[in-house]
Image: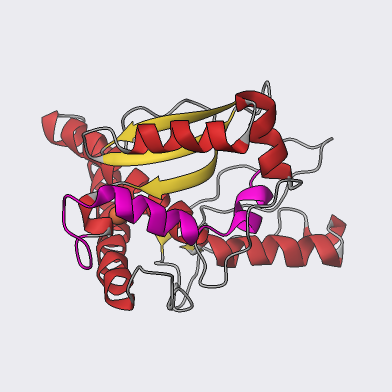
């Protein structure tokens, strides 16, 4: 796909080659076309300005996400189809909101589209965080790893953290379980996100994201088997990916 709006490094002449490659990889990994990603800011620089042009998201390639434990390839493919729908609708909504804004129409239609955008965008991004923390050859959770030590510091043990995570994940309802970190204090918590857009702790960094919607397991498990799905999905978590989110 051509892209006339992909931003270049804000000051390419001053970026080292290593930094440029890291930035380019971040743009590719974010699946963004049209100016949502930006080069890294140095500590002594202002954050990069928002690029011009409408954002355009591309579905990420999860072709390698096959051969998971228990979770079937058919389940994954159906789930990825749903994810691609969120990406498509996010782009369409961004276009619609932009058109109304440029027309000076801030009426009820604009307001409802703005509300809907949170649902679609969060649905897109949460699915990416979920798929990104799964892998067919997942790195194990080791007791001396950074994540295990972090949760042990808050909950006392990995077992206590996991027990609360599962208790949260078994709550009746539709949504997500997120183990997140407060970058201001380093505190961690297990939180519930209702639907896609309700219940986020503002500013928290998601470390582990689990999809608790029935569509995450309805292809290969019964609706009453959420607990079995939770065992399945935890067996496929790539703890190296989770630890990278610790920064
Ligand atoms: Fe999902």
132 and 59: which is toward the camera = 132
Kindly give the residue lying farthest to the left in the view shown: 108
Position of 153 relative to 4 (above/below): above
Q: Is residue 221 magenta?
A: yes
150 and 8: which is toward the camera = 150
Q: Residue at x 45, y 30 (%)?
A: 164
User: 167 left or right of 26?
Assistant: left
220 and 106: which is toward the camera = 220
Image quarter of residue 180: top right
176 and 157: which is toward the camera = 157
Image quarter of residue 174: top left
In percent of width and height, residue 159 lies at 56, 37
In percent of width and height, residue 116 lies at 22, 40
Position of 83 relative to 100 (above/below): below
User: 89 left or right of 159?
Assistant: left
Q: Is residue 225 magenta?
A: yes
In percent of width and height, residue 57 lies at 41, 60
Q: Residue at x 86, y 56 (%)?
A: 14
Q: Is residue 180 visible?
A: no
User: 236 left or right of 242?
Assistant: left
Quarter of the picture containing the N terminus is bottom left
Quarter of the picture containing the C terminus is top right
What number of labels is visible? 0
Query: What stretch of residues is rendered in magenta?
Result: 218-247
Q: Residue at x 32, y 73 (%)?
A: 72
User: 53 left or right of 199?
Assistant: right
Q: Is residue 85 visible?
A: yes
Q: Residue at x 25, y 62 (%)?
A: 82
Report the image quarter containing ligand 1. Answer: bottom left
In percent of width and height, residue 238 lies at 57, 59
């Amino acid at each position: 796909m051509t892209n006339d709006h992909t931003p270049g490094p804000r000051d390419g002449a001053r970026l080292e080659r290593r930094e440029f490659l890291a930035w380019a990889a971040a743009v590719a990994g974010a699946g963004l076309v049209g100016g949502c990603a930006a080069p890294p800011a140095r500590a002594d620089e202002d954050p990069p300005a928002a690029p011009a042009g409408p954002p355009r998201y591309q579905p990420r390639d999860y072709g390698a996400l096959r051969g998971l434990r228990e979770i079937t390839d058919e389940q994954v493919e159906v789930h990825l189809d749903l994810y691609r729908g969120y990406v498509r609708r996010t782009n369409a909504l961004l276009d619609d909101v932009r058109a109304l804004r440029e027309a000076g129409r801030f009426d009820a239609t604009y307001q409802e589209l703005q509300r809907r955008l949170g649902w679609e965008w969060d649905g897109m991004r949460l699915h990416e965080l979920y798929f990104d923390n799964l892998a067919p050859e997942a790195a194990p959770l080791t007791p001396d790893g950074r994540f295990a030590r972090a949760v042990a510091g808050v909950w006392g043990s990995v077992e206590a953290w996991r027990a609360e995570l599962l208790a949260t994940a078994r709550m009746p309802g539709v949504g997500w379980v997120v183990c997140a970190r407060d970058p201001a204090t380093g505190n961690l918590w297990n939180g519930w996100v209702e639907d896609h857009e309700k219940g986020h702790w503002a500013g928290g960094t998601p470390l582990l994201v689990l999809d608790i919607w029935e569509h995450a397991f309805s292809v290969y498990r019964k609706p009453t088997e959420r607990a079995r799905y939770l065992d399945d999905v935890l067996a496929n978590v790539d703890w190296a990916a989770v630890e990278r989110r610790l920064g």
